Image (cartoon, grey):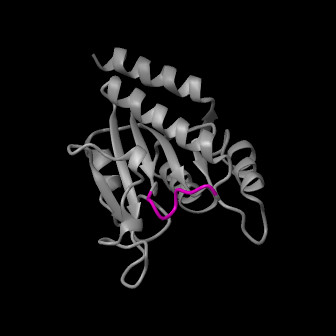
């Protein structure tokens, strides 16, 4: 089991996100629990390419300060919504014989949606902790409605196991017991 932290970059992590305070607190708690229980934390960052504020070398590209990866933690870079396409992440996880992925980050209706569905298609058991992904309002849905649609309707029992933060932290602690 790994904790996959997707697109939690400075440009994207801001108070326009639905349920911002719970979102940031929950991710901090999950990263902390994973590290305390010797579970690998893997990061994926999005690069929009030259001329964008979301490209390598720009301040907005860097991981949000409260979620910063440790030196030994892996970071994969993507250029599309799915964390698995062309990043090396899929091969890395398959080589490690990983079966379960806890996925958190941004944005619910874009990269998290693609990552959950693609992870499922690649045979992973995807676990989505409550209020550990978020998005902003768009012209069709509020951030809240988009979050609820994906987490409560679209993914749960189809593509992922969408469960409470406490249940995920229990899984993390049990993982440490099983691995030891």
Compared across the picture, whether 3 is left or right of 91 comes to right
Of 50 and 128, nearer the camera is 50
Residue visible at 46% across and 45% down in the picture: 123
Q: Position of residue 178 (x, y in %)?
A: 35, 17
Q: In the rendered view of the protein, which quadrant contains the C terminus?
A: top left
Q: Position of residue 174 (x, y in %)?
A: 43, 17
Q: Position of residue 160 (x, y in %)?
A: 59, 41
Tell me which secondary structure the magenta stretch mostly adopts.
Answer: loop
* Residue with the most extreme left position: 72
The answer to whether residue 30 is above or below residue 76 is above
Q: Is 54 within the magenta?
A: no
Residue visible at 40% across and 85% down in the picture: 51
Name the image quarter holding residue 161. Answer: top right
Residue visible at 63% across and 55% down in the picture: 17
Magenta stretch?
9-15
The answer to whether residue 9 is above or below residue 126 is below
Of 126 and 142, nearer the camera is 142
Of 51 and 76, nearer the camera is 51
Q: Position of residue 155 (x, y in %)?
A: 66, 46
Compared across the picture, whether 51 is left or right of 164 comes to left
Q: In the rendered view of the protein, which quadrant contains the N terminus?
A: top left
Regarding residue 127, the answer to whether it shows in the image is no
Regarding residue 125, the answer to whether it shows in the image is yes
The answer to whether residue 77 is above or below residue 179 is below
């Amino acid at each position: 089991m790994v904790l996959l932290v997707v697109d939690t970059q400075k440009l994207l992590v801001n108070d326009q996100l639905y349920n911002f305070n719970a979102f940031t607190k929950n991710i901090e708690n999950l990263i902390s629990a994973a590290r305390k229980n010797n579970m690998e934390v893997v990061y994926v960052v999005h690069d929009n390419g030259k001329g964008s504020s979301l490209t390598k070398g720009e301040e907005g590209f860097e991981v949000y300060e409260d979620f910063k990866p440790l030196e030994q933690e892996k970071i994969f870079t993507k250029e599309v919504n799915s964390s698995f396409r062309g990043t090396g992440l899929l091969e890395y996880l398959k080589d490690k014989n990983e079966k379960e992925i806890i996925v958190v980050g941004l944005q619910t209706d874009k990269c998290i949606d693609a990552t959950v569905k693609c992870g499922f298609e690649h045979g992973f058991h995807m676990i989505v902790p409550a209020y550990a992904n978020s998005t902003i309002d768009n012209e069709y849905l509020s951030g809240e409605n988009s979050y609820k649609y994906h987490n409560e309707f679209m993914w749960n029992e189809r593509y992922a196991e969408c469960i409470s933060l406490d249940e995920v932290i229990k899984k993390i602690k049990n993982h440490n017991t099983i691995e030891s």
